Amino acid sequence: AQGPAASAPAVNDLSSFWMPFTANRQFKNAPRMLVGAQGMHYTTADGRQVLDGTAGLWCCNAGHGNPRIVKAIQDQAGEMDYAPAFQMGHPAAFALANRLAGMLPGDLNHVFFTNSGSESVDTALKIALAYHRMKGEGSRTRLIGRERGYHGVNFGGISVGGITNNRRFFGTLLSGVDHLPHTHLPDRNAFSRGQPEHGAALADDLERLVALHGAETIAAVIVEPMAGSTGVLMPPKGYLERLRAICDRHGILLIFDEVITGFGRLGSAFACEHFGVLPDIVTTAKGLTSGTVPMGAAIVREGIHDAFMSGPENAIELFHGYTYSAHPLACAAALATLDVYQDDGLFARCADLAPHWEERVHGLKGLPHVIDLRNMGLIAGIELEPKPGKPTERAFTAFLKCYEAGLLIRTTGDIIALSPPLIIDRDQIDRIFDTLGDVLKTLD
Ligand code: PLP
């Protein structure tokens, strides 16, 4: 280790940082360094502007460097850097929880703060298990996820998650779960606009799992209402409603992982509002602070919270929490972010831009290798035919070429995912699809 460095030091030795979800050796041979971010653009180390087609990692919904959010974080850092959240409180934490309760539908009114999506998921799963135990149904210990689901990288999240590489290396702590089938039906639904027509009946597989395991063993079902990280899979029409009905029938809690869909991505505050299906727990992160300070939250319905509140008043009701739950900088960032969303009308802006976005997404039909196009709100999934014997290579080449051409996209396998900040304008949408279209034409 060496002494203190300037705020943005030039670095030649890249060996110490083990980069997350990255091909480390490939990256370090040809690094892509970002040194600034403002509005819709990143600045690269070689001084180029790159249009942010992904809101960072689906998180910077208010764009970059919003002055109100920056000032709120700066002010809070000067006023109170940290406060413990165990047996102590600070006003912004309560104000933020109230604010979130007011934004979520129904009686989703109680907020448990975390620092990430992964922590929100594990928090939600733990609350679900403990809830049944509090209610005298301690046999409900099984958790149901879905194939291709992404719920972060902690042990709970990878257990219910359904992305093979996130599971296969990590041993035996993933038991006690089962999975619903994924909803990707390209033969029937390719090139759907918005929710696809076919696939609602896939929810009925939950009845099969209930018959197999017994409802009395199942605590909760967790799904992403729109599955983002696996490559953008929209819920088939009627699917989420059917899951809700089956969960109700069998006393199973329904958890929506809204880490991506929360905070305006579909044109409504949350996907549960957008689809009109009320889950029992919602997990969030990312857009909560527009990515500025790490923060997440699990938000639960009245009845779940209240089930914990019947013991002696001096007893800790839930043995769970993080040193940085409701961190003051994160609370300040989140409150300012929610102000920006509201005052700048960003969720409505997303809804207003969605039809133009949809036209441009589906304008890619017919370009080389494009085998499916999917869209909703300001999200797009562009699925490419994999190169024979070389899966992921074609999409990754598109990513590199777009970056060179001044556009940040994201790829999962051979699927390109787009999810720009909600401050984007029509011209910038056009630039995204013009650039991407040009790049797709060059791919072999
Ligand atoms: N859940 C979903 C649906 C996500 O998309 C993600 C991240 O992409 C996570 C959980 C994990 O969030 P984090 O990376 O903040 O732990």
Image (spheres, rainbow, N blue to C red):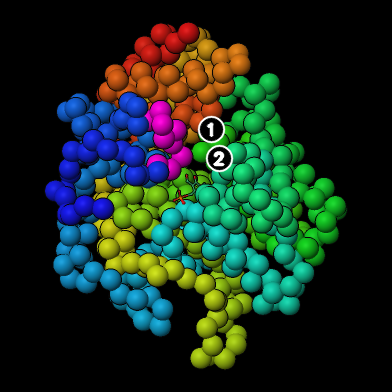
Confirm or reject: label 2 Cβ below 8 Å from ligand 1.
yes
Measuring from the top left, give residue 152's x and y in whole percent. Answer: 52, 49
**Of the pair 172 and 332, the residue shown nearer to us:** 172
Q: Residue furthest front?
A: 1
Magenta-drawn segment: 19-27
Q: Hey, what amino acid is under mark 1?
A: Gly
Measuring from the top left, give residue 182's x and y in whole percent. Answer: 67, 37
Q: Residue furthest left?
A: 6
Tell me if label 2 and label 1 are in contact, CB under 8 Å: yes
Residue 86 sits in quarter: bottom left
Where does label 2 land, which residue? 227
**Of the pair 423 and 113, the residue shown nearer to us:** 113
Q: Is residue 194 above or below residue 405?
A: below
Tag 1's secondary structure?
Answer: loop
Measuring from the top left, give residue 187's x and y in whole percent. Answer: 68, 21
Measuring from the top left, give residue 69's x and y in whole percent. Answer: 23, 54
Horizontal side of residue 104 vs 167, given as left or right: left
Where does label 1 land, which residue? 231
Q: Is residue 85 above or below residue 201?
A: below
Residue drawn at (73%, 77%) of the image = 136
Q: CA distance from mark 2 to mark 1?
A: 7 Å
Residue drawn at (41%, 28%) of the image = 26
Residue 289 sits in quarter: bottom left
Residue drawn at (53%, 12%) of the image = 369
Camera sees residue 413: yes
Q: Is residue 133 above or below residue 160?
A: below
Horizontal side of residue 440 vs 205, given as left or right: left
Query: For residue 25: magenta?
Result: yes
Query: For residue 5: magenta?
Result: no
